[in-house]
Amino acid sequence: MSIGVVLNTLNTQFPDVTVSKIRFLESEGLITPQRTASGYRRFTEADIDRLRFILTTQRDNYTPLKVIKEQLDAMDSGQVTAIVGAGQAETLVSPEQFRAPAVTRLTDADVAAQANTTEEEVANLVKLGLVTPDVSGFFTADDVAVISTALALKAFGFDSRQIKTLRNNARRHADLIAQVANPVATTKSDTARQQAEELSQQMAALVVSLHGTLLKTDLRSEYQP
């Protein structure tokens, strides 16, 4: 099968998978499709089964590709049971959570309705820099989540200045991740951008997990006698 047929086969179960993603998995050594004399990739049913395993494990178990490759190598070597999670740091969040949101075109009225707030409050949070509409003035589902969470914090007594501090901290974390991922994106590999995206998602999950654990530890020590 061609890579296009493989993509159509997988898209029902994995709507986010792309040709770039499949090529990236090949470049990382997780799949090895055959090549025709002219260099075109040709996949077998076994290759599709392998892709399903990779994509399912990554999506459902939040497993980094490095660990998935260890599992595949274990299965390829004839071991009956792959060692799941070997060398994997415990994470509280999934890299999948950091993928681009599904394409949505929500107006400020839509966002206000879904976040159970007013359009005026949405406008205030836009001015605060918490969410930013696209060039056409539309928002995404992630923007709804941001606004809902900000409103929940305000209900606990957080003011605009404190919420903006959280936003600025997130930007600093994003800049740190970009310092590592951006050089990968500028390499000459045809999967460079996909590789940088995967790398940034995994780092983002680790940064958020570390932040959450440190926050929990600091709060616990704050209130211990």
Image: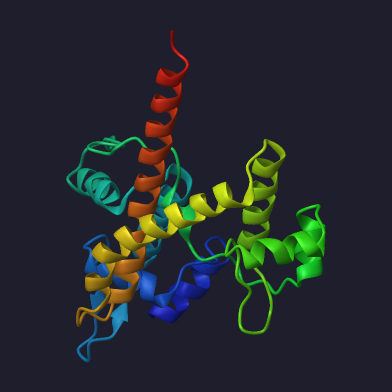
Q: Is residue 51 left or right of residue 160?
A: left
Residue 82 vs residue 46, the one in the foreground: 82
Q: Quadrant of residue 27?
A: bottom left
Q: Quadrant of residue 128?
A: bottom right
Q: Residue furthest bottom?
A: 38
Measuring from the top left, give residue 43's x and y in whole percent: 34, 72
User: Is residue 103 among what the camera can see?
Assistant: yes
Is residue 97 positioned above or below 31 on the image? Answer: above
Measuring from the top left, give residue 46's x and y in whole percent: 35, 61
Measuring from the top left, give residue 113's x and y in whole percent: 82, 59
Residue 194 vs residue 24, the one in the foreground: 194
Which of the image's four quarters has the N terminus?
A: bottom left
User: Is residue 63 among what the camera can see?
Assistant: no
Measuring from the top left, give residue 48's x and y in whole percent: 40, 63
Residue occupying image coordinates x 27% and y 46% = 67
Q: Is residue 111 left or right of residue 180?
A: right
Q: How many marks?
A: 0
Which of the image's four quarters has the C terminus?
A: top left
Q: Residue furthest left?
A: 77
Residue occupying image coordinates x 38% and y 70% = 21
Q: Is residue 168 left or right of residue 76?
A: right
What color scheme is it? rainbow
Residue occupying image coordinates x 80% and y 54% = 117
